[in-house]
Amino acid sequence: MSKVPLTVRGAEKLRKELEQLKRVDRPKVINAIAEARAHGDLKENAEYHAAREQQGFIEGRIKDIEGKLSHAQIIDVTKLHTSGKVVFGATVDVLELDNDEKHTFQIVGEDEADTRNGLISVSSPIARGLIGKTEGDVASVDVPGGLREFEILEIRDLEPREIARPRPSEFPDVNSW
């Protein structure tokens, strides 16, 4: 399996979730199973079945995160030399030429994507169209809603440690295109 790019921040977020699942959620559900089992007849014990279902979800998520981390290529984008080009981890201000709307996107790994907050997956059509472009370039992007053209206004710092989250209303719902 090939390596999947992931920012340092994205990897930290996955590690924290994994830690929460292993140290807090897993022991809690094990105790809930033991308590429900103590109530007797397991065939008609809804608490037992709910706890077992939750345990399955937790164990599945643990395996999922461990798999993602094991196949991740963690990239510290603050150390990349971009030469003024859009690259993985870059925050890009663009003008959508069709409707004169400004958007801000940061190109991140697939597991970090959150289109409502301007975090787009490196494998998304918009990110693929923007990568390699420089300020002033126009990127024609074929999205599910049709062809869109974006003029690159500014390429900003690569993955600042603490990103101030803009209001969701500032970003389009990219999935609706």
Image (cartoon, helix red, strand yellow):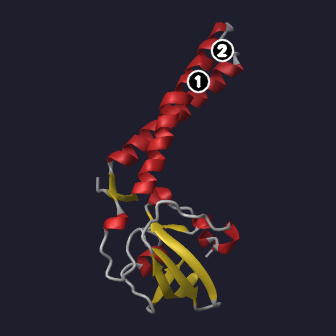
Image: 70 above or below 177: above
Cα gap from disc 1 to disc 2, whole angstroms:
12 Å
Q: Can residue 144 be seen in this view?
A: no
User: On the picture, is 37 further left or further right than 150?
Assistant: right
Badge 1: how crowded within 10 Å, few (<14), some, or many (20+)? some
Horizontal and vertical percent position of residue 62: 46, 37
Comes first in the chain, label 1 or label 2? 1
| Residue named by callout 1 | 28
Q: What residue type is labelled 1?
A: Lys
Q: Residue 13 in the image: x percent, y percent?
A: 48, 49
Q: Is residue 28 above or below residue 93?
A: above
- Circle 2 sits in a helix, a strand or a loop, which is it? helix
Q: Which residue occupies the foreground of this view, 126 or 95?
A: 95
Residue type at mark 2 is Ala
Identify the residue at image location x=57%, y=69%: 118
Residue at 51% in and 34% down:
21
* Residue linked to disc 2: 36
Q: Is residue 38 above or below residue 19?
A: above
